[in-house]
């Protein structure tokens, strides 16, 4: 918990003010993540990251909602082989925003031909 300047904010106990500050910072982090993902969706940039359950994702953002994203998996012949079908990728997947590991988030920069870590 971050201490509040002078210990009290206009009659609000320091611990309550610090909790409010932490919640605001977390909300800003989610807003930053949502904005970043929406930019990737709008630019059709390929993204890669881990989900909270450890699953690695590589593909594109289809939809960025208030509390979720819809992911389109990159085509892979391994997927077709493993399912015995001609489908090259699985169905689009809806994931809650808190289900993404933002520390692993990166986008592919077509110009530089390299992966750029979030928030770049």
Image: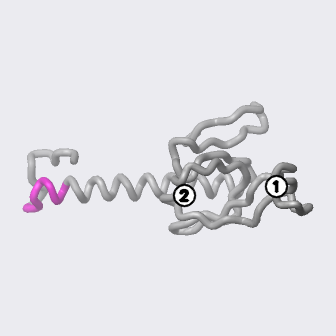
* Residue 39 is covered by the magenta coloring: no
Q: Quadrant of residue 5?
A: top left
Residue 91 at x, y = what percent?
Answer: 75, 66
Tell me which segment is drawn in magenta: 11-17
Give the mark count.
2
How far separated are the C-alphas under marks 2 and 1?
33 Å
| Label 2, residues with CA under 10 Å away: few <14, some 14-19, many ≥20 | some
Residue 6: percent from the left, percent from the top? Answer: 9, 46
Placement of 109 over or under 69, stated as above or below: above
Looking at the rendered structure, which numbered label has been put on residue 118?
Answer: none
Residue located beneath label 2 in the image: 34
Is residue 22 rendered to the left or right of residue 59? left
Indicate the secondary structure of the residue bearing disc 2. Answer: helix
- State the residue lying farthest toward the right: 86
Q: Earlier in the sequence, mark 2 or mark 1?
A: 2
Q: Residue 79, how many percent across, how many down? A: 81, 54
Q: Which quarter of the picture shows residue 107?
A: top right
Look at 23% across and 57% down and name the residue there.
19
Q: Is residue 41 above or below residue 93?
A: above
Q: Which residue lies at the image location 52% right of the left edge and 60% below the top edge?
A: 97
Residue at position x 72%, y 65% in the image: 92
Residue 26 left/right relative to 110: left
Q: Secondary structure at mark 1?
A: helix
Contact (CB < 8 A) between labels 2 and 1? no
Most foreground residue, 32 or 46? 46
Q: Give x and y (percent) for residue 104.
A: 56, 42
Residue at image mark 1: 82
- Residue plotted at (62% across, 42% down): 106
Neighbor class of circle 1 (other Cα within 10 Å; few <14, some 14-19, many 20+) is few
- Where's the C terminus, which quadrant? top right
């Amino acid at each position: 918990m971050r201490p509040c300047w002078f210990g009290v904010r206009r009659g609000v106990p320091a611990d309550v003010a610090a909790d409010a500050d932490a919640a605001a910072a977390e909300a800003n982090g989610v807003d930053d993540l949502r904005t970043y993902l929406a930019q990737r969706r709008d630019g059709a940039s390929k993204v890669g990251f881990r989900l909270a359950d450890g699953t690695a994702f590589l593909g594109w953002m289809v939809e960025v909602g208030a509390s979720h994203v819809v992911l389109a998996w990159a085509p892979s012949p391994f997927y077709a082989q493993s399912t015995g079908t001609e489908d090259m990728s699985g169905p689009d997947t809806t994931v809650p925003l808190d289900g993404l590991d933002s520390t692993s988030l990166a986008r592919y920069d077509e110009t530089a031909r390299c992966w750029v870590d979030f928030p770049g």
